[in-house]
Image: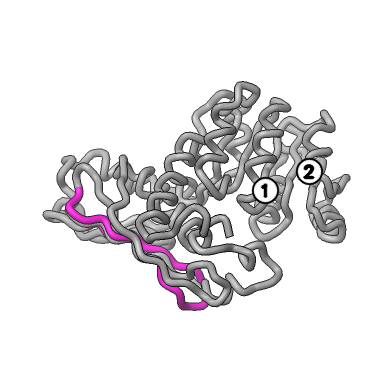
């Protein structure tokens, strides 16, 4: 499969490593608006061509698939163009800044939305799949409380002039970046449909929020709380599930605790590669990543949280 990668930042470079180390892919192009970054990535990963205009790359006619690893403000238009060219697409989350932008792509008759997959990270972790299976096999009312906690050095991240996050406005900080992870993971685990019942945002120096607290409702759980806190040197996350005979914590390291009276544990020993979803798309197989419809549901929850926090659409435009 001839593949191009648009975006050569941290995420794009990670995808490039996965692609060039898999003989089933032929990475033929990389693209960045900054010519020196595109050239450097091409040299480091041994890619034969580098581009600065993503539209030219997508319409050049020699790609089978593309990885879009750009800021969400740019990703939606590139996704739409790639799908109109009948390319297979892996796009990094959250795909768009606003639900209406992704909704337009889904409604476009020129876009074959089944040709795209969204790379929400938790969906590619084996231990998360194990917990999902446990939840599916448990009684529907077994879990009473779900507590989500995401943390990281967000204050520093949103004042870093080297990344797009420096330009983020209120409602487009950790709520969009990390909140989307939380909403997708909860939905993937089987807690949907979710409804936002309250939200509060803590604004940082740049104007974007660096902390958030969100309360949600589901059909089965008495309480679902998501806390995003600013602090620490690295990004961490955890989801704690509580109920009768249940006290289980899910983190990036694995899952352990009590499950229906039995002590269970599973390490994070299986990390699947998002780029392999391009092959699944080519073979009409079920992908591990999220569908565009799944991603739209997440963005609608992000917007509901913005509204609950009192952030109007005009303010969120920045």
Q: Main secondary structure of the magenta part?
A: strand
Residue annotated with mark 1: 74
Question: Could you say where residue 20 lies in the image, as x and y percent from the top left?
Answer: 73, 47
Is 71 placed above or below 141 here? Answer: below
Q: Nearer the viewer, residue 118 or 26?
A: 118
Screen quadrant of the N terminus: top right
Residue annotated with mark 2: 54
When asked about the image quadrant of residue 108, the answer is top right
Is 168 placed above or below 190 here? Answer: below
Screen quadrant of the C terminus: bottom right
Q: Work out whether residue 284 can be spotted.
A: yes
Q: Nearer the viewer, residue 317 or 214?
A: 317
Query: Which region is colored magenta?
Result: 221-241
Q: Residue at x 59, y 47 (%)?
A: 92
Question: Could you say where residue 249 lies in the image, as x and y percent from the top left?
Answer: 30, 61
Q: Residue at x 16, y 51 (%)?
A: 260
Question: Could you say where residue 295 lies in the image, as x and y percent from the top left?
Answer: 48, 41
Disc tally is 2
Is 89 placed above or below 111 here? Answer: below
Q: Residue at x 44, y 59 (%)?
A: 311
Mark 1 closeness class: few <14, some 14–19, many ≥20 residues within 10 Å = some
Q: Secondary structure at mark 2?
A: helix
Q: Residue at x 21, y 56 (%)?
A: 223
């Amino acid at each position: 499969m001839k593949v191009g990668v648009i975006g050569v930042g941290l995420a794009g470079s990670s995808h490039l490593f996965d692609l060039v180390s898999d003989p089933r892919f032929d990475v033929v192009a990389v693209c960045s608006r900054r010519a020196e970054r595109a050239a450097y990535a091409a040299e480091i990963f041994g890619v034969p061509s580098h581009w600065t205009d993503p539209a030219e790359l997508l319409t050049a006619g020699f790609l089978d698939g593309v990885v879009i690893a750009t800021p969400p403000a740019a990703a939606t238009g590139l996704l739409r163009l790639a799908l109109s060219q009948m390319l297979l697409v892996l796009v990094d989350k959250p795909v768009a800044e606003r639900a209406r932008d992704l909704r337009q792509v889904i409604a476009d008759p020129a876009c074959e939305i089944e040709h795209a997959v969204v790379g929400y990270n938790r969906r590619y972790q084996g231990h998360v799949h194990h917990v999902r299976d446990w939840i599916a096999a448990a009684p529907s009312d077994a879990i009473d409380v779900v507590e989500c906690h995401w943390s990281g050095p967000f204050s520093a991240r949103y004042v870093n002039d080297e990344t797009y996050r420096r330009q983020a406005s209120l409602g487009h900080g950790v709520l969009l970046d990390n909140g989307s992870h939380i909403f997708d993971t909860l939905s993937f685990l089987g807690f949907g449909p979710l409804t936002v019942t309250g939200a509060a945002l803590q604004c940082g120096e740049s104007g974007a929020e660096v902390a958030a607290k969100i309360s949600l409702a589901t059909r089965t759980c008495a309480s679902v709380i998501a806390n995003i806190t600013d602090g620490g040197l690295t990004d961490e996350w955890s989801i704690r599930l509580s109920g009768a005979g249940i006290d289980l914590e899910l983190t990036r390291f694995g899952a352990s605790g009590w499950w229906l009276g039995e002590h269970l544990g599973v390490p994070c020993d299986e990390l699947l590669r998002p780029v392999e979803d391009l092959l699944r798309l080519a073979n009409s197989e079920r992908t591990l990543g999220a569908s565009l419809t799944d991603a739209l549901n997440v963005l609608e929850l992000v917007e509901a949280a913005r509204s609950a926090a009192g952030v109007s659409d005009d303010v969120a435009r920045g």
